[in-house]
Image (cartoon, rainbow, N blue to C red):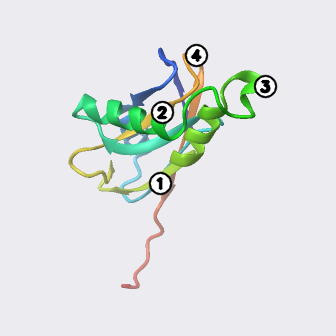
Amino acid sequence: MKELHISTKKRCELVDITRQVQDIVAESKIKEGICHIYCPHTTAAISINENSDENIETDLMNFLNHLVPHGKWLHDSVDGNGDAHIKANILGSDKSMPITDGKLLLGTWQSINFCEFDGPRDGRKVIVTILRALQSSRAY
């Protein structure tokens, strides 16, 4: 298990963490298994999506901002980030993916993103856990 530290620059943004996660997988020397990525923050999330076109981030943020606008939630009276909590719940705090031949099994255009909804922030964490597949002589 390893911890990534992420700093964000905007209130809402996606940060591509694919390379850092793949480096952790390679460092583990595990050839077959599962990579679990977890965000321990209630105003941030993890997503897997295309990252080669910057319009994807813009479209996603525009959609979420339309669906969950800033400044109209009961929780805003506490610290002004009710929308961030809801957006994080919609996308989710974790993702798991297979490791095959020592690499993340991602689609051609897929990348792993840390989704910030209450930035900018320093010291955001992402926990990456690598689980080794059990070897079995049984065919399934």
Amino acid type, residue under disc 4 in the picture: Asp
Q: Dot 2 lies on which element?
A: helix
Tell me the residue that label 1 is attached to.
96
Tell me the residue that label 4 is attached to.
122
Q: Dot 3 lies on which element?
A: helix
Label 3, label 1: how far apart the Cα atoms are: 33 Å
Inspect this view and state whether residue 30 appears: yes
Dividing the image into 4 quarters, which one contains the C terminus? bottom left
Amino acid type, residue under disc 3 in the picture: Val
Q: Are the residues at dot 3 and dot 4 in contact (C-beta closer than 8 Å)?
A: no
Marked residue nearer the N-terminal end (3 or 1): 3
Q: Dot 4 lies on which element?
A: loop
Q: Quadrant of residue 48?
A: top left
Q: Callout 1: 10 Å neighbours few (<14), some, many (20+)?
A: some
Marked residue nearer the N-terminal end (4 or 1): 1
Marked residue nearer the N-terminal end (2 or 3): 2
Report the disc number at residue 65.
2
Q: Are the residues at dot 4 and dot 2 in contact (C-beta closer than 8 Å)?
A: no
Amino acid type, residue under disc 2 in the picture: Asn
**Which mark is nearer the camera, 3 or 1?**
3
Label 3, label 4: how far apart the Cα atoms are: 21 Å
Marked residue nearer the N-terminal end (4 or 2): 2
Q: Callout 4: 10 Å neighbours few (<14), some, many (20+)?
A: few
